[in-house]
Amino acid sequence: MSDGVLGFDHVALPVSNLERAVSFYTETLGLPSVDERNPADGTYHWVRVGHAASLNLSEVGGDGVRAGHVAFAAPASFLETLRERLAGAGVEFRDAETSLYFADPDGNELEVTCWREARLRDSGANHW
C-alpha cells in the first residue's frame, strides 16, 4: 500500500445559491446527491463523482471565493450526451475534441475529459 496520495477524493466549491448549484450538478451533469449536512448550519451538499470521489458544494453567499479548474474524467461516449445537456440548459461551453470546458452557475471553471494515457503518450506528451 502506498504512503502517498492515492487519487482524487473531493473538491470543495463555494456557491452563492446552494439549491441552484445542487440542481446544476445533479440534473444537468447527472451526478448523484450523497449527503447534505453541515453541523453548524446545513449549508453544505455533497454530490458523488465516480466511485469514491465527491464535490462538496458550500453556500457562501454573494460572489464568494472562486475555485480554480476542476476536471472530471468520463468516457468519450458521454461527451455527446453532455454537449446536448449543456446546450439544452443554455450553458455555454468550449469543445476541445476530447474535452468540454464550461462554467457552473457561480463561474467555477469545469472540464469533462476523455483523455486516455495512451493517447497522451502517442501525442508526445512528456509529463508522465
Image: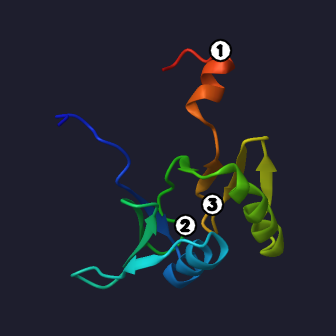
In the picture, the disc for residue 38 is: none
Residue receiving disc 1: 124
The reply to whether callout 1 and callout 2 are in contact (CB within 8 Å) is: no
Q: Depth-wise, is mark 1 or mark 2 nearer the camera?
A: 1
Q: Depth-wise, is mark 2 or mark 3 nearer the camera?
A: 3
On the picture, is 113 further left or further right than 47? right
Earlier in the chain: of badge 1 and badge 2, it is 2
**x and y, in percent, of residue 66 in the image:** 51, 55
| Gap between marks 1 and 2 measured at Cα | 40 Å
Residue 58 at least partly seen: no
| Gap between marks 3 and 1 measured at Cα | 32 Å
Q: Residue at x 48, y 75 (%)?
A: 61
Amino acid type of the residue that numbered disc 1 sits on in the rendered structure: Gly
Residue receiving disc 2: 63
Q: Residue at x 63, y 69 (%)?
A: 29
| Gap between marks 2 and 3 measured at Cα | 9 Å
Amino acid type of the residue that numbered disc 3 sits on in the rendered structure: Gly
Is 102 rendered above or below residue 126?
below
Q: Residue at x 45, y 79 (%)?
A: 33
Amino acid type of the residue that numbered disc 2 sits on in the rendered structure: Asp
Q: Depth-wise, is mark 3 or mark 1 nearer the camera?
A: 1
Residue receiving disc 3: 107
Q: State the SS at label 2.
A: loop
